[in-house]
Amino acid sequence: MLECLLGNPGRLYSQSEISRQVGCSVSSVGRAIDALQRLDLVKVVYLPGQAKVIALNPESSITTILLKLREDLKSQP
């Protein structure tokens, strides 16, 4: 799930969309979101007329480190 979010850092996702993309249950995604939110890695936003949406937290220092690590790993031969 984290890889999905790191791969599209500015994108908003619904919990069911993440569930489909990573191939696990919506309840499992919900538990993972709760854990990532406690670490300040994701933000949960409630949009009018929609369910909650989840996005990577660009203000988190951990997010910054993970994005840099992901980029560094992609550039390795």
Image: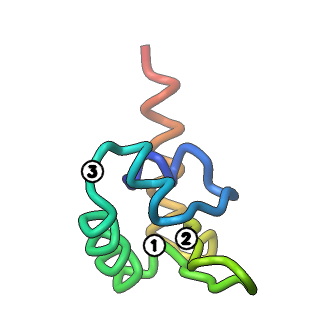
Q: CA distance from mark 2 to mark 1?
A: 10 Å
Q: Is residue 35 above or below residue 2?
A: below
**12 to the left or right of 44:** right
The residue drawn where x is 62% and y is 55% is: 9
Q: Quadrant of residue 66?
A: bottom left
The residue drawn where x is 46% and y is 41% is: 70
What amino acid is found at the position of numbered circle 1 in the picture?
Leu
Q: Quadrant of residue 51?
A: bottom right
- Label 2 or label 1, whichever lies nearer to me, is 2
Q: CA distance from mark 3 to mark 2?
A: 16 Å
Q: Quadrant of residue 27?
A: bottom left
Element at label 2: strand
Element at label 1: loop
The residue drawn where x is 43% and y is 13% is: 77
- Front one among 53 and 72: 53
User: Residue 55 at x, y = what percent?
Assistant: 58, 67
**45 to the left or right of 74:** right
What amino acid is found at the position of numbered circle 3 in the picture?
Cys
Q: Is residue 23 above or below residue 35?
A: above
- Crowd rating for badge 2 (residues with CA inside 10 Å; few <14, some 14–19, many 20+): many
Tag count in the figure? 3
- Front one among 22 and 69: 22
Judging by the rendered image, the residue that carries numbered circle 2 is: 54
Judging by the rendered image, the residue that carries numbered circle 3 is: 24
Q: CA distance from mark 1 to mark 3?
A: 20 Å
User: Residue 24 at x, y = what percent?
Assistant: 27, 50
For marks 2 and 1, the one nearer the N-term is 1
